[in-house]
Image (cartoon, rainbow, N blue to C red):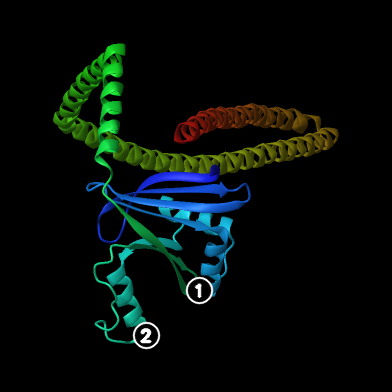
Protein backbone atom coordinates (compact mmCIF):
# COMPACT_ATOMS: atom_id res chain seq x y z
CA UNK A 1 0.00 0.00 0.00
CA UNK A 2 1.66 3.22 -1.20
CA UNK A 3 0.77 6.82 -0.43
CA UNK A 4 0.08 8.69 -3.67
CA UNK A 5 -2.64 11.24 -2.88
CA UNK A 6 -2.94 14.19 -0.53
CA UNK A 7 -2.53 13.70 3.23
CA UNK A 8 -3.53 15.94 6.10
CA UNK A 9 -3.11 15.94 9.89
CA UNK A 10 -4.97 18.60 11.85
CA UNK A 11 -6.84 19.28 15.08
CA UNK A 12 -10.58 19.76 14.78
CA UNK A 13 -13.21 20.70 17.38
CA UNK A 14 -16.62 19.19 16.74
CA UNK A 15 -20.00 20.43 17.96
CA UNK A 16 -19.75 18.52 21.24
CA UNK A 17 -16.76 20.74 22.18
CA UNK A 18 -14.15 17.95 22.21
CA UNK A 19 -10.89 18.26 20.31
CA UNK A 20 -9.78 15.42 18.05
CA UNK A 21 -6.73 14.80 15.90
CA UNK A 22 -7.90 13.94 12.39
CA UNK A 23 -5.66 12.25 9.82
CA UNK A 24 -6.60 11.61 6.21
CA UNK A 25 -4.43 9.87 3.64
CA UNK A 26 -5.02 8.60 0.10
CA UNK A 27 -3.19 5.35 -0.73
CA UNK A 28 -3.11 2.83 -3.57
CA UNK A 29 -3.66 -0.90 -3.24
CA UNK A 30 -2.17 -3.28 -5.81
CA UNK A 31 -1.05 -0.38 -7.99
CA UNK A 32 -4.47 0.77 -9.20
CA UNK A 33 -7.10 0.78 -6.47
CA UNK A 34 -7.18 4.00 -4.49
CA UNK A 35 -8.27 4.09 -0.87
CA UNK A 36 -9.06 6.82 1.63
CA UNK A 37 -7.64 6.21 5.10
CA UNK A 38 -9.36 8.20 7.86
CA UNK A 39 -8.18 8.20 11.50
CA UNK A 40 -9.66 10.20 14.38
CA UNK A 41 -7.99 10.26 17.81
CA UNK A 42 -9.23 11.81 21.03
CA UNK A 43 -6.67 14.44 22.00
CA UNK A 44 -6.90 13.69 25.74
CA UNK A 45 -7.90 10.02 26.09
CA UNK A 46 -5.90 8.83 23.01
CA UNK A 47 -8.81 6.63 21.83
CA UNK A 48 -8.69 5.86 18.11
CA UNK A 49 -11.28 5.32 15.38
CA UNK A 50 -10.13 4.29 11.95
CA UNK A 51 -11.50 3.10 8.64
CA UNK A 52 -10.53 2.59 4.96
CA UNK A 53 -12.77 3.49 2.01
CA UNK A 54 -12.09 2.66 -1.60
CA UNK A 55 -13.12 4.90 -4.50
CA UNK A 56 -16.11 2.72 -5.40
CA UNK A 57 -17.52 2.91 -1.85
CA UNK A 58 -17.22 6.74 -1.76
CA UNK A 59 -18.82 7.19 -5.17
CA UNK A 60 -21.63 4.73 -4.32
CA UNK A 61 -22.26 6.60 -1.03
CA UNK A 62 -22.57 9.95 -2.80
CA UNK A 63 -24.81 8.39 -5.45
CA UNK A 64 -27.23 7.14 -2.77
CA UNK A 65 -27.60 10.64 -1.31
CA UNK A 66 -28.73 11.97 -4.70
CA UNK A 67 -25.73 14.28 -5.13
CA UNK A 68 -22.99 12.28 -6.85
CA UNK A 69 -19.36 13.27 -6.25
CA UNK A 70 -16.19 11.84 -7.75
CA UNK A 71 -13.63 10.33 -5.37
CA UNK A 72 -11.11 13.17 -5.80
CA UNK A 73 -13.84 15.79 -5.37
CA UNK A 74 -15.05 14.14 -2.17
CA UNK A 75 -11.49 14.06 -0.75
CA UNK A 76 -11.10 17.77 -1.59
CA UNK A 77 -14.43 18.51 0.16
CA UNK A 78 -13.26 16.62 3.25
CA UNK A 79 -10.00 18.59 3.37
CA UNK A 80 -11.87 21.87 2.94
CA UNK A 81 -14.16 20.97 5.85
CA UNK A 82 -11.22 20.12 8.14
CA UNK A 83 -9.35 23.32 7.25
CA UNK A 84 -12.55 25.42 7.39
CA UNK A 85 -11.92 27.03 4.01
CA UNK A 86 -15.51 26.71 2.82
CA UNK A 87 -18.67 27.85 4.59
CA UNK A 88 -20.84 25.37 2.68
CA UNK A 89 -19.09 22.32 4.24
CA UNK A 90 -19.37 21.34 7.92
CA UNK A 91 -18.22 18.26 9.85
CA UNK A 92 -19.66 16.48 12.86
CA UNK A 93 -18.75 13.32 14.81
CA UNK A 94 -21.74 11.25 16.01
CA UNK A 95 -22.20 8.05 17.92
CA UNK A 96 -24.49 5.23 16.77
CA UNK A 97 -27.23 6.41 19.16
CA UNK A 98 -27.01 9.98 17.83
CA UNK A 99 -27.34 8.73 14.27
CA UNK A 100 -30.39 6.61 15.15
CA UNK A 101 -32.05 9.58 16.85
CA UNK A 102 -31.52 11.67 13.74
CA UNK A 103 -33.02 8.94 11.59
CA UNK A 104 -36.01 8.67 13.92
CA UNK A 105 -36.62 12.40 13.75
CA UNK A 106 -36.31 12.33 10.00
CA UNK A 107 -38.87 9.54 9.55
CA UNK A 108 -41.04 10.71 12.50
CA UNK A 109 -40.73 7.51 14.45
CA UNK A 110 -40.18 6.84 18.13
CA UNK A 111 -36.61 7.26 19.29
CA UNK A 112 -36.90 4.09 21.38
CA UNK A 113 -37.60 1.81 18.47
CA UNK A 114 -34.82 -0.12 16.75
CA UNK A 115 -31.92 1.59 18.46
CA UNK A 116 -29.82 -1.52 17.89
CA UNK A 117 -26.89 -2.42 20.04
CA UNK A 118 -26.39 0.40 22.55
CA UNK A 119 -22.93 -0.87 23.41
CA UNK A 120 -21.71 -0.13 19.88
CA UNK A 121 -18.68 2.15 20.14
CA UNK A 122 -18.57 3.01 16.47
CA UNK A 123 -18.33 6.67 15.38
CA UNK A 124 -19.72 8.35 12.27
CA UNK A 125 -18.08 11.34 10.60
CA UNK A 126 -20.91 13.32 8.98
CA UNK A 127 -19.87 15.61 6.11
CA UNK A 128 -22.68 18.09 5.43
CA UNK A 129 -22.74 19.94 2.11
CA UNK A 130 -25.09 22.93 2.14
CA UNK A 131 -26.30 24.38 -1.15
CA UNK A 132 -28.83 27.13 -1.79
CA UNK A 133 -32.03 25.10 -1.29
CA UNK A 134 -30.77 21.74 0.05
CA UNK A 135 -28.46 20.05 2.57
CA UNK A 136 -26.74 16.76 1.80
CA UNK A 137 -25.25 14.52 4.51
CA UNK A 138 -22.47 12.04 3.74
CA UNK A 139 -21.91 9.60 6.69
CA UNK A 140 -18.53 7.86 7.00
CA UNK A 141 -18.46 5.01 9.58
CA UNK A 142 -15.35 4.62 11.76
CA UNK A 143 -14.43 1.45 13.64
CA UNK A 144 -13.27 1.70 17.23
CA UNK A 145 -9.59 0.73 17.66
CA UNK A 146 -9.45 1.16 21.43
CA UNK A 147 -6.70 2.73 23.46
CA UNK A 148 -3.18 2.75 22.03
CA UNK A 149 -0.80 -0.09 22.88
CA UNK A 150 1.30 0.67 25.99
CA UNK A 151 4.40 -0.69 24.30
CA UNK A 152 3.93 1.78 21.44
CA UNK A 153 3.36 4.58 23.93
CA UNK A 154 6.55 3.69 25.81
CA UNK A 155 8.48 3.69 22.54
CA UNK A 156 7.19 7.14 21.63
CA UNK A 157 8.06 8.40 25.12
CA UNK A 158 11.62 7.14 24.70
CA UNK A 159 11.89 8.83 21.32
CA UNK A 160 10.69 12.09 22.79
CA UNK A 161 13.15 11.87 25.67
CA UNK A 162 16.02 11.23 23.28
CA UNK A 163 14.95 14.19 21.15
CA UNK A 164 14.77 16.40 24.25
CA UNK A 165 18.28 15.40 25.36
CA UNK A 166 19.62 16.08 21.89
CA UNK A 167 18.11 19.54 21.82
CA UNK A 168 19.48 20.37 25.25
CA UNK A 169 22.98 19.17 24.31
CA UNK A 170 23.11 21.19 21.08
CA UNK A 171 22.47 24.45 22.89
CA UNK A 172 19.23 25.29 21.17
CA UNK A 173 17.56 25.51 24.55
CA UNK A 174 20.12 28.08 25.69
CA UNK A 175 19.54 30.20 22.61
CA UNK A 176 15.83 30.04 23.24
CA UNK A 177 16.35 31.07 26.85
CA UNK A 178 18.44 34.07 25.79
CA UNK A 179 15.82 35.00 23.26
CA UNK A 180 13.12 34.81 25.92
CA UNK A 181 15.17 37.05 28.23
CA UNK A 182 15.64 39.62 25.46
CA UNK A 183 11.95 39.58 24.69
CA UNK A 184 11.02 40.04 28.36
CA UNK A 185 13.38 43.07 28.62
CA UNK A 186 11.88 44.56 25.46
CA UNK A 187 8.42 43.95 26.86
CA UNK A 188 9.28 45.79 30.08
CA UNK A 189 10.60 48.76 28.10
CA UNK A 190 7.41 48.88 26.05
CA UNK A 191 5.33 48.79 29.23
CA UNK A 192 7.30 51.74 30.66
CA UNK A 193 6.92 53.72 27.45
CA UNK A 194 3.20 53.01 27.48
CA UNK A 195 2.95 54.35 31.03
CA UNK A 196 4.85 57.50 30.04
CA UNK A 197 2.54 58.05 27.10
CA UNK A 198 -0.54 57.59 29.25
CA UNK A 199 0.83 60.04 31.85
CA UNK A 200 1.77 62.50 29.13
CA UNK A 201 -1.70 62.41 27.63
CA UNK A 202 -2.63 65.60 29.47
CA UNK A 203 0.11 67.61 27.75
CA UNK A 204 -1.00 66.19 24.43
CA UNK A 205 -4.54 67.32 25.14
CA UNK A 206 -3.28 70.82 25.96
CA UNK A 207 -1.30 70.89 22.72
CA UNK A 208 -4.32 69.78 20.72
CA UNK A 209 -6.46 72.46 22.39
CA UNK A 210 -3.90 75.17 21.62
CA UNK A 211 -3.67 73.99 18.01
CA UNK A 212 -7.45 74.18 17.66
CA UNK A 213 -7.52 77.71 19.15
CA UNK A 214 -4.78 78.81 16.76
CA UNK A 215 -6.73 77.41 13.83
CA UNK A 216 -9.82 79.34 14.94
CA UNK A 217 -7.80 82.56 15.24
CA UNK A 218 -6.36 82.04 11.77
CA UNK A 219 -9.86 81.59 10.35
CA UNK A 220 -11.01 84.83 12.04
CA UNK A 221 -7.98 86.75 10.76
CA UNK A 222 -8.58 85.49 7.26
CA UNK A 223 -12.20 86.64 7.42
CA UNK A 224 -11.22 90.11 8.69
CA UNK A 225 -8.51 90.35 6.05
CA UNK A 226 -11.04 89.49 3.34
CA UNK A 227 -13.27 92.29 4.66
CA UNK A 228 -10.36 94.73 4.48
CA UNK A 229 -9.63 93.65 0.93
CA UNK A 230 -13.26 94.27 -0.05
CA UNK A 231 -13.12 97.74 1.52
CA UNK A 232 -9.92 98.54 -0.35
CA UNK A 233 -11.49 97.38 -3.60
CA UNK A 234 -14.52 99.63 -3.10
CA UNK A 235 -12.24 102.56 -2.19
CA UNK A 236 -10.17 101.90 -5.30
CA UNK A 237 -13.23 101.98 -7.55
CA UNK A 238 -14.43 105.22 -5.87
CA UNK A 239 -11.02 106.84 -6.40
CA UNK A 240 -10.98 105.81 -10.04
CA UNK A 241 -14.39 107.43 -10.54
CA UNK A 242 -13.15 110.60 -8.82
CA UNK A 243 -10.08 110.70 -11.08
CA UNK A 244 -12.28 110.39 -14.14
CA UNK A 245 -14.52 113.22 -12.89
CA UNK A 246 -11.52 115.48 -12.18
CA UNK A 247 -9.98 114.78 -15.57
CA UNK A 248 -13.25 115.62 -17.35
CA UNK A 249 -13.70 118.83 -15.29
CA UNK A 250 -10.07 119.89 -15.99
CA UNK A 251 -10.59 119.41 -19.71
CA UNK A 252 -13.78 121.46 -19.62
CA UNK A 253 -12.05 124.31 -17.72
CA UNK A 254 -9.17 124.43 -20.22
CA UNK A 255 -11.67 124.58 -23.10
CA UNK A 256 -13.62 127.41 -21.36
CA UNK A 257 -10.40 129.40 -20.81
CA UNK A 258 -9.42 129.20 -24.48
CA UNK A 259 -12.89 130.34 -25.63
CA UNK A 260 -12.74 133.36 -23.21
CA UNK A 261 -9.38 134.42 -24.58
CA UNK A 262 -10.69 134.30 -28.13
CA UNK A 263 -13.68 136.46 -27.16
CA UNK A 264 -11.46 139.06 -25.48
CA UNK A 265 -9.18 139.28 -28.51
CA UNK A 266 -12.22 139.86 -30.69
CA UNK A 267 -13.49 142.71 -28.47
CA UNK A 268 -10.06 144.36 -28.43
CA UNK A 269 -9.87 144.24 -32.24
CA UNK A 270 -13.32 145.86 -32.63
CA UNK A 271 -12.33 148.62 -30.24
CA UNK A 272 -9.16 149.28 -32.21
CA UNK A 273 -11.08 149.54 -35.49
CA UNK A 274 -13.52 151.98 -33.92
CA UNK A 275 -10.69 154.13 -32.58
CA UNK A 276 -9.08 154.30 -36.03
CA UNK A 277 -12.33 155.48 -37.66
CA UNK A 278 -12.82 158.16 -35.03
CA UNK A 279 -9.22 159.42 -35.56
CA UNK A 280 -9.95 160.25 -39.23
CA UNK A 281 -12.86 162.59 -38.34
CA UNK A 282 -11.12 164.54 -35.66
CA UNK A 283 -7.51 164.43 -34.59
CA UNK A 284 -8.17 166.32 -31.39
CA UNK A 285 -10.79 163.91 -30.47
CA UNK A 286 -8.53 161.08 -31.54
CA UNK A 287 -5.86 162.11 -29.13
CA UNK A 288 -8.34 162.11 -26.27
CA UNK A 289 -10.00 158.96 -27.52
CA UNK A 290 -6.64 157.28 -28.13
CA UNK A 291 -5.50 158.17 -24.63
CA UNK A 292 -8.71 156.91 -23.17
CA UNK A 293 -8.74 153.89 -25.55
CA UNK A 294 -5.16 153.10 -24.81
CA UNK A 295 -5.85 153.24 -21.10
CA UNK A 296 -8.81 150.91 -21.54
CA UNK A 297 -6.77 148.52 -23.68
CA UNK A 298 -3.96 148.61 -21.18
CA UNK A 299 -6.39 147.83 -18.41
CA UNK A 300 -7.89 144.96 -20.42
CA UNK A 301 -4.47 143.74 -21.40
CA UNK A 302 -3.40 143.93 -17.79
CA UNK A 303 -6.50 142.07 -16.66
CA UNK A 304 -6.17 139.23 -19.18
CA UNK A 305 -2.77 137.95 -17.92
CA UNK A 306 -4.12 137.67 -14.39
CA UNK A 307 -6.96 135.53 -15.55
CA UNK A 308 -4.59 133.40 -17.57
CA UNK A 309 -2.43 132.93 -14.49
CA UNK A 310 -5.46 131.83 -12.45
CA UNK A 311 -6.49 129.31 -15.10
CA UNK A 312 -2.92 128.06 -15.29
CA UNK A 313 -2.80 127.65 -11.52
CA UNK A 314 -6.12 125.78 -11.52
CA UNK A 315 -4.92 123.36 -14.21
CA UNK A 316 -1.66 122.92 -12.36
CA UNK A 317 -3.49 122.17 -9.12
CA UNK A 318 -5.76 119.69 -10.90
CA UNK A 319 -2.72 117.97 -12.39
CA UNK A 320 -1.07 117.72 -8.97
CA UNK A 321 -4.26 116.35 -7.47
CA UNK A 322 -4.55 113.88 -10.39
CA UNK A 323 -0.95 112.73 -9.82
CA UNK A 324 -1.64 112.30 -6.10
CA UNK A 325 -4.71 110.22 -6.87
CA UNK A 326 -2.74 108.07 -9.32
CA UNK A 327 -0.07 107.46 -6.67
CA UNK A 328 -2.72 106.54 -4.12
CA UNK A 329 -4.40 104.16 -6.61
CA UNK A 330 -1.02 102.56 -7.30
CA UNK A 331 -0.41 101.96 -3.58
CA UNK A 332 -3.93 100.60 -3.13
CA UNK A 333 -3.47 98.17 -6.04
CA UNK A 334 -0.16 97.05 -4.56
CA UNK A 335 -1.84 96.49 -1.17
CA UNK A 336 -4.64 94.54 -2.86
CA UNK A 337 -2.16 92.27 -4.65
CA UNK A 338 -0.22 91.61 -1.43
CA UNK A 339 -3.45 90.99 0.45
CA UNK A 340 -4.67 88.48 -2.15
CA UNK A 341 -1.34 86.61 -1.98
CA UNK A 342 -1.55 86.46 1.80
CA UNK A 343 -5.14 85.26 1.65
CA UNK A 344 -4.17 82.37 -0.57
SS class of the residue under badge 2?
A: helix
Residue at 55%, 27% in the rendered image: 320
User: Is residue 188 shown above or below 2?
Assistant: above
User: Is residue 180 shown above or below 222?
Assistant: above
Mark number for residue 107? 2
Residue at 86%, 34% in the rendered image: 280
Which x, y percent locates residue 262?
Answer: 75, 37
Residue 115 appears in which quarter of the rendering? bottom left
Left or right relative to 222: residue 280:
right
Precedes in sequence: disc 2 or disc 1: 1
SS class of the residue under badge 1?
A: helix
Mark number for residue 266? none
- Between 99 and 175, the one nearer to me in the picture: 99
Residue 313 appears in which quarter of the rendering? top right
Packing grade of label 1 (10 A; few <14, some 14-19, many >=20) is few
Residue on which disc 1 sits: 65
Left or right relative to 7: residue 198:
left
Left or right relative to 295: residue 71:
left
Which x, y percent locates residue 38?
Answer: 43, 52
Which x, y percent locates residue 326?
Answer: 56, 31
Amino acid sequence: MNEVGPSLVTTYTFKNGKEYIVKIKVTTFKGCQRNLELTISDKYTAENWRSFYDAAYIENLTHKTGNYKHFDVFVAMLQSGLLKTSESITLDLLTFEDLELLRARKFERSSCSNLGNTSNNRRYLILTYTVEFDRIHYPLPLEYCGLPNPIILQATIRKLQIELERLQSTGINRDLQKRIEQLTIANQKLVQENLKLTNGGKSLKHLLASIKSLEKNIIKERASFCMQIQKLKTENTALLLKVQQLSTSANKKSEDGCSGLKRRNRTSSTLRSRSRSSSISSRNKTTSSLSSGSSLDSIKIQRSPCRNVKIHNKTKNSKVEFENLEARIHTLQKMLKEGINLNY
